[in-house]
Image (cartoon, helix red, strand yellow):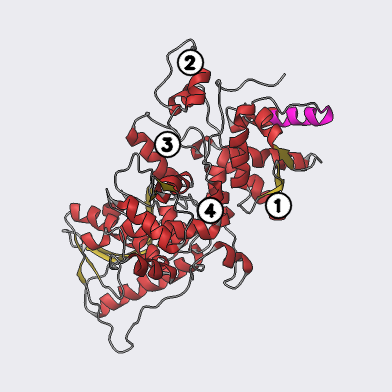
């Protein structure tokens, strides 16, 4: 007898626009959104017009008018690339979305990481669909107003992609074929409330395979959603479809079993789930900040040995992979002077660097030539600089930068100062960019001393939560006397060497 569902009508609802899940379509779609980031109205038609001019997806006409944006925006929201426009008035691309545009993360990497992090409940799926409403009406209590409440009340806290991966790994290690059918998922995995329920699902699948029976009619309502999940998972590096109704592990996953198991352990940890604090829009908005930022631990799944010329890069990094070492900054060999200027906080907080005419064809051509890739990384960098500068100004500091060198120099009323070098990083690029940052911040400190300025603390800032125990933290603070700030959309931590005189301003 199959286990009952957490609540009547429970399913793994997901976008039906899986047709859009390919690298080129997704990347080009997001580039059509980026020029209008920050707009609060009127962007629908502009994005649709740009999508048509760029040949992205189909116009999807309604009453004679193209409406592609309305139909396909869900794809970006589901993947954590865009805040839902239903709860965030301004069009806002997430940190992950900017990383994807900048070539910091590839398509199949993005899908793989997000597939293992996507959970129920989440801030995106809040509407109670008519089928579910019909299934639950007439129960002992009044129906809640949101799907999130139903799932919380039913104690559902599940990552379906992670559950599929865990069961496949356990099947493989137990000597069974590492594959799952749609039938098996909807009968044995769907009833799981939590990922820790996987042993029960695993044992039920083994019993079923030892004594097969017809189970196709059980939880049939969930079939379309499970199929959509399969289509989603197959775009990652870890899963493949052996047939339309069967999913299995890829050769990459089988070659990296220890990495896969270790990632399951990390993602199954209760600390790595989003837990709603309430059911209103602000709480739902926090989902997108959480899901739109990929923690450093999850980035262990990024491939470390991708080369610019490989077929993998051509297929997954549509505008090319970001060079981790390239530095185009010109430094005169004759003049050590710095050109410090007041920071323009308005410019640092801009939504786009794209300053094109309203000519849609001209804009489409600029995007095809990679304009958005060149700007996405700069936007991420500048927003971090603005965040820090604003914080220090509120403390009474004066802040400056040099367009050709120093990202941020803060001097507080007590005379103490610090030079901050900001780097946007992924786990793949971290080490190379850390080395670059060390050289830069040391050079800038030396050049300031040559000018006769008082010595300043040196601090490196990254948008990754590497943790206190990371050897790079000790290397910087204990060995090099350089501070480290780790700031993300959901966390802030800072570490200072004992010699730091300004640490009370940026560590606390």
Which range of residues does the magenta coloring cover?
A: 201-212
Q: Which SS type dominates the magenta stretch? A: helix
Calculate the distance from the C-alpha at mark 3 to the C-alpha at mark 2. Answer: 23 Å
Residue 137, labelled with which disc? 2
Relative image position of residue 108 (x, y in whole percent): 58, 55
* CA distance separating discs 1 and 3: 31 Å
220 lies left or right of 122: right
Using the numbered discs, state the Cα–Cα distance from disc 4 to disc 2 in whole angstroms: 38 Å
Report which residue position mark 1 lands on.
250
Q: Quick one: quadrant of the N terminus?
A: top right
Instruction: Residue at 70%, 52% (x, y): give it.
Output: 250
Q: Is residue 203 magenta?
A: yes
Residue 123 badge: 3
Q: Is residue 374 above or below residue 474?
A: below
In the structure shown, which secondary structural element does the residue marked by tag 3 occupy?
A: loop
Q: Position of residue 253 (x, y in %)?
A: 69, 52
Secondary element under disc 4, as helix, strand or loop, is helix
User: Which residue is drawn at the image coordinates 48% and 73% (left, top)?
Assistant: 325
- Tag nearer the camera, 4 or 2: 2
Task: Decide if residue 106 is in sight here.
Answer: no
């Amino acid at each position: 007898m199959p286990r009952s569902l957490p609540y009547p009508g429970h399913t793994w609802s997901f976008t039906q626009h899986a047709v859009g899940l390919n690298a080129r379509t997704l990347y080009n779609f997001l580039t059509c959104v980026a020029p209008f980031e920050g707009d609060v109205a009127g962007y629908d038609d502009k994005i649709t017009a740009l999508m048509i001019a760029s040949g992205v997806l189909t116009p999807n006409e309604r009453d004679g008018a193209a409406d592609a944006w309305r139909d396909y925006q869900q794809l970006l929201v589901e993947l954590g690339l865009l805040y839902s426009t239903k709860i965030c008035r301004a069009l806002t691309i997430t940190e992950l979305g900017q990383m994807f545009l900048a070539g910091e993360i590839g398509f199949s990497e993005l899908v793989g990481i997000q597939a293992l992090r996507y959970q129920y409940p989440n801030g995106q799926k809040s509407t109670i669909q008519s089928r579910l409403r019909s299934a639950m009406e007439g129960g002992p209590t009044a129906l809640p107003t949101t799907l999130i409440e139903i799932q919380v009340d039913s104690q559902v806290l599940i990552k379906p992609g992670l559950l599929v991966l865990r069961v496949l790994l356990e099947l493989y290690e137990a000597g069974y074929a590492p594959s799952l059918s749609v039938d098996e998922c909807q009968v044995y995995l769907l009833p799981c409330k939590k990922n820790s329920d996987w042993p029960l699902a695993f044992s039920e699948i083994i019993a079923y395979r030892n004594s097969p029976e017809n189970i196709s009619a059980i939880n049939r309502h969930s079939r379309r959603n499970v199929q959509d999940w399969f289509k989603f998972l197959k775009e990652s590096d870890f899963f493949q479809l052996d047939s339309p109704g069967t999913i299995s592990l890829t050769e990459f996953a089988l070659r990296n079993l220890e990495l896969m198991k270790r990632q399951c352990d990390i993602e199954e940890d209760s600390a790595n789930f989003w837990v709603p604090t309430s059911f209103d829009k602000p709480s739902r908005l926090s989902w997108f900040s959480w899901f739109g930022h990929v923690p450093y631990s999850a980035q262990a799944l990024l491939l470390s040995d991708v080369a610019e010329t490989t077929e993998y890069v051509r297929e997954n990094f549509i505008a090319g992979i970001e060079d981790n070492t390239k530095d185009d900054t010109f430094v005169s060999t004759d003049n050590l002077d710095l050109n410090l200027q007041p920071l323009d906080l308005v410019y640092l907080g801009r939504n786009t660097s794209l300053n094109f005419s309203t000519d849609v064809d001209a804009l489409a051509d600029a995007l095809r030539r990679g304009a958005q890739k060149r700007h996405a990384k700069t936007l991420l960098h500048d927003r971090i600089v603005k965040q820090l500068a604003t914080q220090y100004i509120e403390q009474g500091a004066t802040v400056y930068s040099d367009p050709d060198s120093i990202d941020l120099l803060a001097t507080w009323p007590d005379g103490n100062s610090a030079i901050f070098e900001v780097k946007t990083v992924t786990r793949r690029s971290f080490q190379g960019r850390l080395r670059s940052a060390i050289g830069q911040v040391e050079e800038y400190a030396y050049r300031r001393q040559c000018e006769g300025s008082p010595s300043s603390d040196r601090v490196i800032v990254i948008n990754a939560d590497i943790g206190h125990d990371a050897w790079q933290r000790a290397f910087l603070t204990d060995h090099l006397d350089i501070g480290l700030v780790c700031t993300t959309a959901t966390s802030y931590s800072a570490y200072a060497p004992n010699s730091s005189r300004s640490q009370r301003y940026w560590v606390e």
